[in-house]
Image (tube, helix red, strand yellow):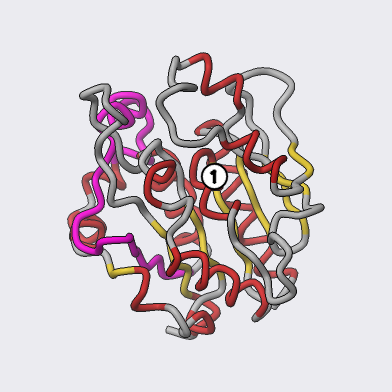
Amino acid sequence: MAANKKILFILTSHDQLGDTGKKTGWYAEEVAVPATILTNHGYEIVYASPKGGKAPLDPNSVEDAKDNPLVTSFLDNKDIAHKIDNTHKIEEFVGKENEFAAIIYPGGHGPAYDLEHNEAAIKLTAAAYEAGKVVGGICHGSIGLTDVKLSDGTFLVKDKNVTGFSDDEEKSVGLENVVPSLLETKLKKNGANYHKADKQWGAKVVTDGRIVTGQNPASAPGFGEAIHAAIQAHQ
C-alpha cells in the first residue's frame, strides 16, 4: 500500500487510572469511529504503543458504546483485534515518518499517563509534521501533541487552534486531581489557542492546517472526516 494511504494510530500502554483501582486504556469510540471512517476512505490503519504488544481497552468505553453498531462491529473484528493485541513499539517508526500520511493520537485516559512525555512519539510527531504530514489527537489523545517541539525549538501547538478534553469535562467526571495534567490547561500553557464546544460533551473538531483535533467522544465522526480532508488538502 502506498505511503500516503497508511495512517499511524498511537495507542496507550497504560491501564491503571491513577491510584483509584479502576482500569483505563484507549477509548473505544475514539479509535473505532475514526479508524472505520478512514478505512472506508481507503487508508490502512497501523497501530503502535509505547510498550508494543497489547494496547489495553478501557472497559467503561465498551459499555458506553454498546449501542453504537460501528463501535461494536470494530471491536468484534478479529483482524483488528489481532493488530491491537500486537501493536508495534512507537520507536520502530522513528525516522520512518514518510511511511504515513498522518500520525494520530486517539483518546482514553490512558494516554494522559504515558503519551505526554514519550520521547519516541514526540520525535516521530515532530518529524512527521515537518515532513508535511497531518498530525492529530482526539480527547485525551491530544496530550501527545502538547510537548512536541519543532526544529526551531517552538512547541507544535504554539499559536495553533486546537481542542481536546476540556478541564470542565475532566472535573465533571471527578478526575481533575487524578490525571497527571489537565489537557486544556497544558495546551494553553504551551501557547495553543484552545477552543471547545458551547456545551460540555458537545462535538467540536478544529483543523489548523495540518493539525486536526477533536474534543471528546461526540467529536469522533467529525474528527475522522477532518483527518481525511486535511490529508487530501495537503498531499
Location of residue 218 in the rendering, given as x and y in whole percent from the top left corner: 55, 31
- Give the labeled residue for mark 1: 138
* Label 1 neighbour load within 10 Å: few <14, some 14-19, many 20+: many
| The magenta stretch spans residue 45 | yes
Quadrant (top left, top right, bottom left, bottom right) of the N terminus: bottom left
SS state under label 1: strand
The residue sitting at 60% across, 25% down in the picture is: 167
Instruction: Decide if residue 155 is on the left or right side of residue 2.
Output: right
Quadrant (top left, top right, bottom left, bottom right) of the C terminus: bottom right
Location of residue 19 in the rendering, given as x and y in whole percent from the top left corner: 27, 26
Instruction: Decide if residue 24 is on the left or right side of residue 183.
Output: left
The residue sitting at 20% across, 64% down in the picture is: 86
The residue sitting at 70% across, 54% down in the picture is: 157
Location of residue 190 in the rendering, given as x and y in whole percent from the top left corner: 70, 48
Residues 15 and 118: in front is 118
Q: Which residues are magenta?
A: 43-72
Q: Is residue 104 above or below residue 193?
A: below
Amino acid type for the residue under numbered disc 1: Ile
Q: Is residue 162 above or below residue 82?
A: above
| The magenta stretch spans residue 187 | no
The answer to which quarter of the image holds residue 72 is top left
Instruction: Decide if residue 29 is on the left or right side of residue 225.
Output: left
The residue sitting at 69% across, 60% down in the picture is: 155
Q: Is residue 28 above or below residue 97?
A: above
Q: Is residue 192 above or below residue 49?
A: above
Residue furthest right in the image: 159
Residues 208 and 184: in front is 184
